Image (cartoon, rainbow, N blue to C red):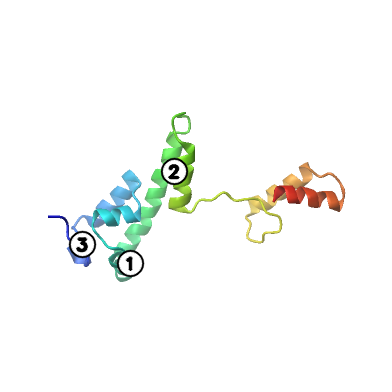
Amino acid sequence: MGRLIQYRREDLPETFYEDVLSKMKEEGMSEKEVCAEYSITPSAHARFKRESKEYKETFEIGKEFAEAWWMSQGRLNIENKQFNVGIYAFQMKNRFKWRDTPLTVGDKDRKIADKYKEKEVLEKYKLGGENENEKVKSVIN
C-alpha cells in the first residue's frame, strides 16, 4: 500500500526538516520534488508554510542550498566537454529564474553594470554625431 497523502504537519516524520535540507543541499532537489517524495499536496504545502515558521524557513534555506548545488554542477563541469551547457542553462533559467539580460538603452530598471556597458559600447563604436549614436543604440537593442 502506498503512502498516505499528507494533510497534517504532525504526520510528517520526526526528521523531516533535516531530511528536507539534506535532499535540497546534497541532491539539488526542488521544493516540488521534496513535497512529492513526502506525498505533500500543493495545498497542504501552502498551508504548512502559512502555519509554521519552521516549515517555511526550512524550504527557504533549502532553496538556497538547491541553487548552490546546481551552481556547483556548472562549476565542477566547466572543463568537461561532455557536459551539456544548453541543458544546464535551461535548468538554471527555469529552476531559479535566471535570465539572459539584454542590453536595452533607456531601461530604468537596469543594473549599474548594464549602464556601464551601454556607455562602454557607445564610446567604443561612436561614429560621430547624434544620428550615428542612435544607429549604435539600435544595434545594441
Q: Which residue is mark 3?
A: 5
Q: How many marks?
A: 3
Residue on which disc 2 sits:
71
Disc 3 and disc 2: Cα gap in Å? 32 Å
For the view shown, which residue lies furthest in the left direction? 1
- Give the mark nearer the N terminus: 3 vs 2: 3
The answer to which of marks 1 and 2 sits earlier in the sequence is: 1
Q: Position of residue 5 (x, y in %)?
A: 21, 62
Task: Give the left or right position of residue 47, taking residue 107 as reference.
Answer: left
Viewer-nearest of labels 3 and 2? Answer: 3
At label 3, the amino acid type is Ile
Quadrant into which the N terminus falls: bottom left
Above or below 54: residue 64: above
- The residue identified by callout 1 is 46
Is residue 58 depicted above or below 123 in this figure? below
Under circle 1, the secondary element is helix
* Relative depth, front residue between 44 and 113: 44
Question: In the image, 6: left or right of 50?
Answer: left
Of the residues tagged 1 and 3, which is closer to the observer?
Answer: 3
User: What is the secondary structure assignment of the residue under circle 2?
Assistant: helix
In contact (CB < 8 Å): disc 1 and disc 3: no
C-beta proximity under 8 Å, tags 1 and 2: no
Q: Is residue 24 left or right of residue 71?
A: left
Label 1 and label 2: CA atoms lie apart by 27 Å
Earlier residue among tags 1 and 3 = 3
**Residue at the (44%, 46%) spot, across then down:** 91
Residue 16 x/y as whole percent? 23, 56
